[in-house]
Image (spheres, rainbow, N blue to C red):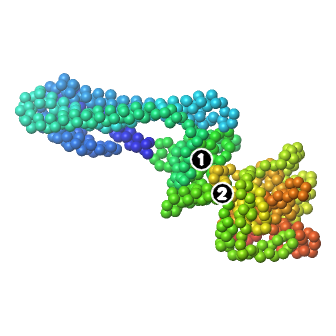
């Protein structure tokens, strides 16, 4: 808004400069063309009338000027035959004031505009230097010097902008004085120099000239009062604490508003300029509905950068820069990477985008919906017993097949376990997969990789060739926690609730992406870049698995782990998948059926006939190629068999 308003004032100043030059040329013609004074005064009269037709961006207060100039135009027309020997007095009372106005006031505005531009450029350079400060092992002395440089640049830009704005405001008063004062001197000169003119117009013009003089003095008084008020305001503004100019001054305890549904401010945008080279550009971003907009400096309006509906946002490490976050599209494709100026801006942008992605802005009261959403997240860390009942109401009773003994156990409808019986209160949550020390050493020693196409070497190749089922899914690890029971799938739903609530409370958006390989022997999480297996679970140790009833992309399973001899523990692992979680559950269920069927060759043959396979007869296909629901192409990218 400030820059848009500034452009209006600058446009007005440019129009005034052009008009002033034209008016000065007309007055100089009157002064220089003594022998053609009649023609010159006629041109002046026309030029005075042209003021009304000028398209000033700021026309407030010009009505009096226009009416006065109209009257002056009539006087010029009546006196155009009397101008013959006015060279000296015209030079002193008509030409000189307008020249002073142009050389003093208009030139001052132009000079202050250049100084404001230089200060803005210096601020941009210092901000770019500050943004390049490293995140790790940063030199505190260097950081303090750069922060001081930014503060000085901001103070300089602030001071130059205030002076520039004051000059533009004062110009609105001075232009009215400058338009009328020369004509006042011109008219008085005519009366003083020509007796006939005095006899013709003195009685009629005295009252008019007196009113014009009073109006000029009144405008000058308003200007003096406005200048004094602006001077006092300027002193108050530049005497603030140094922390106002220092970026990220409240990094220890910033006041963060997590209920925002719209946000605006400057961010650094990461642009790729080559295969490995990138540049960062500081631009003005703002949200509009469900869209993220960007408006470059000098642009009339903003342009669409990213559709935020159903997208996700997470913090990222990018080129050793601080406060970076990335917006990911609903399909899982990485979007733009941005850098905020401070920790407060960084967290508020992430919260605002996260709120907008849930389409809260479409509700009748978006602010109340955002507050309620965050309050719900705060309450979610407290275990409740109604979570399971909620799922029971929203879905019909179903039979759950126990893969261990092939018995069909009806779903319990007589009551659901208390959440304290499923998960102990205060159970810690792990938000990233950390390999045990022995596995870490083994993988770094041998660098053994798991290939999704069954082309890995040595023992892993033989193991995969022996597997009748291989299915890969792209997943992101959300968290894991110890559980006390695996009797029902409600323990998975409770773990999902607590993991998601903890992420919302602690503002954790970073997720580790992996490839989940489901085979007839185990579940493996594979690094998508190095193809190194991060962790592996025997399929027989997976006792419960389920997908979320509302969010189809949430999947979880419970694993029995052996800690010491005779002691076992149970842990729930929660993931977000690019595909529907039911497909992963189906693959795990099929793997368990294959394990049971391998004990009987005939049963195994019957089972393999009932599932779709690839041409080599080894791998299961989750989707038939005849499907037309638009998900085949996506599955082909995310699941490689």
Q: Label 2's element? A: loop
Residue 176 percent location from the top left of the image: 26, 37
Give the quadrant of residue 588: bottom right
Residue 465 percent location from the top left of the image: 90, 60
Disc on res. 239? none
Q: Label 1's element? A: helix
User: What residue is rendered at 49% in x and 33% in y?
Assistant: 241
Residue 633 percent location from the top left of the image: 71, 63
Find the distance from the CA under tag 2 to the CA under tag 1: 21 Å
Residue 212 seen in the current view: yes
Of the numbered discs 2 and 1, the one sitting upstream in the chain is 1
Residues tagged 2 and 1 counted as in contact (Cβ below 8 A):
no
Label 2 CA crowd tier, 10 Å (few <14, some 14–19, many 20+): some
> Which residue is identified by label 1?
347
Task: Locate the C terminus by quadrant.
Answer: bottom right
Q: Pick the residue in front: 530 or 428.
A: 428
Label 1 CA crowd tier, 10 Å (few <14, some 14–19, many 20+): some
Residue 19 percent location from the top left of the image: 30, 37
213 versus 402 height, above or below: above
> Which residue is identified by label 2?
381
């Amino acid at each position: 808004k400030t820059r848009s308003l500034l452009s209006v004032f600058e446009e007005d100043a440019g129009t005034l400069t052009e008009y002033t030059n034209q008016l000065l040329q007309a007055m100089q013609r009157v002064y220089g063309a003594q022998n053609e004074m009649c023609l010159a005064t006629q041109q002046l009269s026309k030029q005075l009338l042209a003021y009304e037709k000028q398209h000033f961006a700021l026309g407030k207060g010009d009505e009096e000027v226009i009416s006065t100039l109209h009257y002056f135009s009539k006087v010029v027309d009546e006196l155009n035959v009397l101008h013959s020997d006015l060279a000296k007095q015209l030079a002193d009372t008509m030409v000189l004031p307008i020249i002073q106005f142009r050389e003093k006031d208009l030139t001052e505005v132009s000079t202050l505009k250049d100084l404001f531009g230089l200060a803005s450029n210096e601020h941009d350079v210092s901000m770019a230097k500050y943004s390049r400060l490293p995140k790790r092992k940063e030199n505190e002395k260097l950081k303090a010097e750069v922060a001081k440089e930014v503060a000085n640049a901001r103070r300089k830009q602030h001071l130059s902008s205030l002076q520039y704005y004051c000059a533009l405001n004062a110009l609105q008063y001075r232009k009215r004085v400058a338009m009328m004062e020369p004509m006042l001197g011109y008219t008085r000169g005519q009366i003083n120099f020509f007796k006939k003119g005095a006899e013709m117009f003195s009685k009629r013009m005295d009252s008019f000239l007196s009113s014009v003089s009073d109006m000029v003095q009144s405008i000058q008084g308003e200007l003096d009062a406005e200048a004094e008020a602006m001077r006092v305001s300027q002193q108050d503004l530049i005497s603030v604490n140094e922390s106002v100019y220092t970026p990220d001054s409240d990094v220890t305890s910033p006041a963060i508003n997590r209920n925002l549904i719209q946000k605006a401010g400057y961010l650094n945008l990461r642009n790729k300029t080559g295969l490995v080279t990138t540049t960062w550009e500081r631009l003005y971003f703002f949200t509009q509905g469900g869209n993220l907009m960007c408006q470059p400096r000098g642009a009339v309006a903003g342009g669409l950068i990213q559709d935020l509906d159903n997208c996700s946002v997470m913090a990222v490490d990018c080129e050793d820069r601080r406060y970076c976050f990335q917006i990911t599209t609903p399909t899982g494709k990485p979007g733009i990477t941005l850098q905020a100026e401070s920790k407060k801006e960084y967290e508020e942008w992430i919260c605002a985008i996260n709120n907008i992605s849930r389409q809260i802005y479409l509700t009748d009261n978006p602010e109340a919906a955002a507050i309620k959403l965050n309050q719900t997240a705060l309450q979610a860390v407290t275990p409740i017993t109604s979570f399971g009942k909620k799922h029971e109401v929203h879905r019909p009773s179903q039979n759950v097949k126990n893969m261990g003994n092939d018995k069909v156990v009806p779903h319990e409808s007589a009551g659901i376990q208390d959440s304290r019986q499923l998960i102990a209160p205060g159970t810690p949550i792990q938000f990233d997969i950390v390999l045990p020390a022995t596995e870490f050493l083994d993988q770094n020693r041998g660098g053994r990789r798991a290939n999704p196409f069954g082309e890995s070497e040595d023992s892993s190749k033989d193991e995969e060739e022996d597997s009748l089922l291989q299915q890969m899914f792209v997943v992101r690890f959300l968290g894991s926690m110890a559980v006390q029971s695996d009797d029902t799938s409600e323990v998975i739903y409770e773990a999902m609730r607590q993991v998601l609530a903890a992420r919302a409370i602690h503002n954790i958006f970073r997720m580790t992406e992996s490839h989940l390989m489901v085979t007839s022997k185990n579940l493996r999480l594979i690094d998508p870049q190095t193809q190194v297996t991060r962790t592996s679970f025997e399929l027989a140790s997976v006792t419960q698995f389920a997908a979320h009833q509302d969010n189809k992309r949430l999947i979880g399973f419970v694993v029995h782990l052996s800690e010491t001899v005779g002691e076992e523990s149970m842990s729930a692992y929660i993931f977000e998948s690019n595909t529907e979680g039911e497909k992963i559950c189906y693959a795990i269920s099929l793997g368990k059926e294959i394990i049971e069927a391998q004990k009987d060759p005939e049963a195994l043959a019957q089972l393999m006939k009932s599932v779709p396979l690839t041409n080599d007869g080894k791998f299961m296909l989750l989707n038939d190629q005849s499907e037309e629901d638009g998900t085949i192409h996506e599955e082909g990218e995310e699941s490689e068999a």
